[in-house]
Amino acid sequence: MTKRDVSLGVVGAARASLSKLLGAAADAPGEGKDFPVAMPDEEWRSRLTAEQYHVLRRHGTERAGSSPLDNEYRKGTYFCAGCGAPLFSSDAKFNSGTGWPSFFKPLEGAVETSEDNTLFMRRTEVHCARCGGHLGHVFEDGPPPTGLRYCMNGVALRFEPEAGA
């Protein structure tokens, strides 16, 4: 176990405690909902890195500017790092200047949303429709044609470039 693993654990525990104190759900994403890909928490922990687990299964957020996917602009597809479901096309990616990979629309049926009222904020949380993994949030300050900004945690994504890209 590294210092980073311990830090992520401490941050996750603090967030869960604060969320419970504020009356928000600190459970795993999609708690109580059936998803096509479901497995026990122990299996998610063994399949994911500590940072992926923190983000995908515990609603965490990676540090802005830390993901190399923020600067990835080759043609290709972005997949869920948890279950491998295709989520976004590179054709919908744009540079939002926020430090997180951003898209103006997901692939059809790839994501679901829910209200996130944690930490005294009201946001719309984005989850993988196949496994329920937390991906990030969507905001109404994006570019045309949708006006939406899907601000995703790079650690929750896996990019596969098109052949020859």
Image: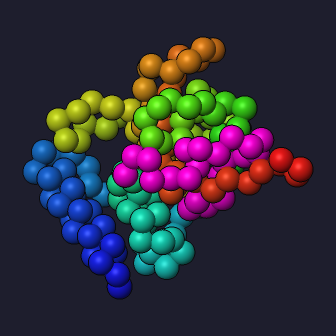
Quick one: 76 or 146, which is closer to the camera? 76
Residue 133 in sight here: no
- In the rendered image, residue 79 lying in the magenta stretch gets the answer yes
* Residue 104: percent from left, percent from top: 58, 27
Most distant residue in the right direction: 164
Left or right, residue 59 beside residue 67: left
Residue 122 drawn at (x, y percent) = 27, 30
Based on the displayed image, in which of its 4 quarters is residue 11 positioned? bottom left
At which x and y percent is residue 132? 50, 52
> Measured from the top left, where is residue 86 in percent x and y?
69, 48
Residue at 68%, 40% (x, y): give it.
Answer: 73
Viewer can see residue 161: yes
Quarter of the image where the N terminus is located: bottom left
Point 60% across, 14% down: residue: 144
Q: How is the image coloured?
A: rainbow
Q: Which residues are magenta?
A: 63-85
Residue 123's quadrant in the figure?
top left
Classify 63 as above or below 117: below
Q: Residue at x 56, y 31 (%)?
A: 95
Q: Is residue 88 magenta?
A: no
State the residue in front, 135 or 151.
151
Name the residue furthest left: 21
Residue at (60% x, 30% y) in the render: 94
**Above or below 126: residue 80:** below
Residue, far bottom: 1
Magenta stretch prevailing secondary structure: loop
Give the number of marks.
0
